[in-house]
Amino acid sequence: MNAKVYDRRNVFRGAIALAVYIGAIVAANILSANFGLVPVGFGLVVSAGTYAAGFALLSRDFVHTYLGVRGVLLGMAVGLALSWFLATPALALASAVAFLVAEVADMLVFLWARPRGFVRAALISNCVSAPVDTVLFLWIAGFPLTFESIVGQMVGKILWATIVPLAIYVGVRALRRARNERMANREPTPTGGLIE
């Protein structure tokens, strides 16, 4: 295993990502069980849990980065077990099959693309796993497989729950980098303080 996995900050970040991942899985199933299909605009519909499922796709990539494949499998197992009791068994089963197949596809693509950078790997892997997850989940859960529902899910998962959060992530990272560069360029004073 990579030594960075054992770094405290990375374990902490991984734990946060794991909690978000589990919460997103459970939230997606509870929302879908309680609200079914909802309009997303432009005549498109999504299962109510699509936005949470999209966050599951992205948070899973962070879990994979910080905790590895075992962390992803642990999160999936806990999320689906909780969904079995908190949503409905039928949705939990649909979610389990869809997540399992989509997770394997995502992990393989993410591992392949990770050397090209986290953002690129997350985007590519989510663009592969989102359609797989969508079609399997809708079909097994008994939701209609229509143009409106499939395209609606893609808009929800890829645009709003993957591209927008990744853009925020990139923006925050750029701001931190700029702040760190400013801090590195400050001159220390004879008393140890910094000159502004």
Image (tube, rainbow, N blue to C red):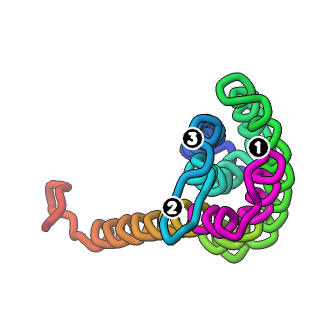
Percent position (x, y) of residue 171? 41, 70
- What residue range appears in magenta? 129-156
Instruction: Estimate the spatial distance between the alpha carbons at disc 1 and disc 3, rounded to whole Å.
Output: 16 Å
User: In the image, is 180 to the left or to the right of 101?
Assistant: left
Of the numbered discs 1 and 3, the one sitting upstream in the chain is 3
Residue sitting at 73 percent across and 50 percent down? Answer: 143
Q: Residue at x 71, y 52 (%)?
A: 64
Residue where numbered disc 2 is placed: 40
Give the mark toward the camera: 1 or 2.
2
69 with respect to 151 (left or right): right
Frontmost residue, 80 versus 107: 80
**The disc labelled 3 sits on which kind of residue?**
Phe
How far is mark 3 from mark 2, CA to CA? 13 Å
Residue occupied by mark 3:
35
| Number of numbered discs visible in the structure rendering | 3
Q: Residues within 10 Å of mark 3 (few under 14, many from 20)?
A: few
In the image, is 19 to the left or to the right of 99? left
Q: Quadrant of residue 148?
A: bottom right
Q: Name the residue that disc number 1 marks.
A: 95
